[in-house]
Image (cartoon, rainbow, N blue to C red):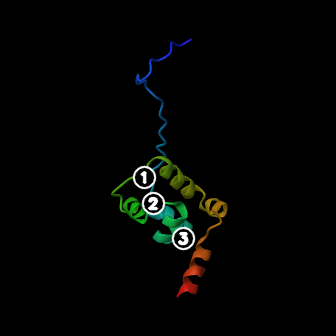
Amino acid sequence: MRSPTPRGTRTRGRATAFEGHHLDVGKVRGKVGLSQEEFARAFGVSLGTLRNWEQKRVRPDGPARVLLTVIDRDPVSVLKALRIGPKAAATKRRRAA
């Protein structure tokens, strides 16, 4: 049995890093057929962040990297699960014009 740690003492935690493969965020977005604005809105990412990822100024990390990997590997299932798609978005644009 471990001895209790005194209050306020820092201990080493456990972190799990997901590296995955190199992500080309522009190609991932292209697989789902959404504009930058639509993709950012659909996946809860700011437009500026998405543009930084696509222009490789910033690398996505943590949950964003995992989500992008899932979208990259199976875009149809992700769109289906979220009930979004490029055709629905295109229809909304045409009606608004």
> Can you give x and y, in whole percent of width and height, for residue 10 in the image?
40, 24
Q: How far apart are marks 2 and 1 (CA)?
A: 9 Å
Question: Callout 2: helix, strand or loop?
Answer: helix
Q: How far apart are marks 3 and 2 (CA)?
A: 12 Å
What's the amino acid at mark 1?
Pro
Mark 1 — residue?
60
Q: Residue at x 48, y 30 (%)?
A: 14
User: Residue at point 39% right, 64% down?
Assistant: 48
Q: In front: 44, or 65?
A: 44
Q: Which residue ends up furthest to the bottom in the rendered image?
A: 97
Return the residue at label 3.
33
Report the amino acid beneath label 3. Gly
Q: How crowded is mark 3: few (under 14 residues within 10 Å), some or many (20 or more)?
A: some
* Residue where numbered disc 2 is placed: 25
**Residue 91 at x, y percent in the picture:** 60, 81
The reply to whether dot 2 and dot 1 touch (C-beta < 8 Å) is: yes
Measure the C-alpha gap from mark 1 to mark 3. 20 Å
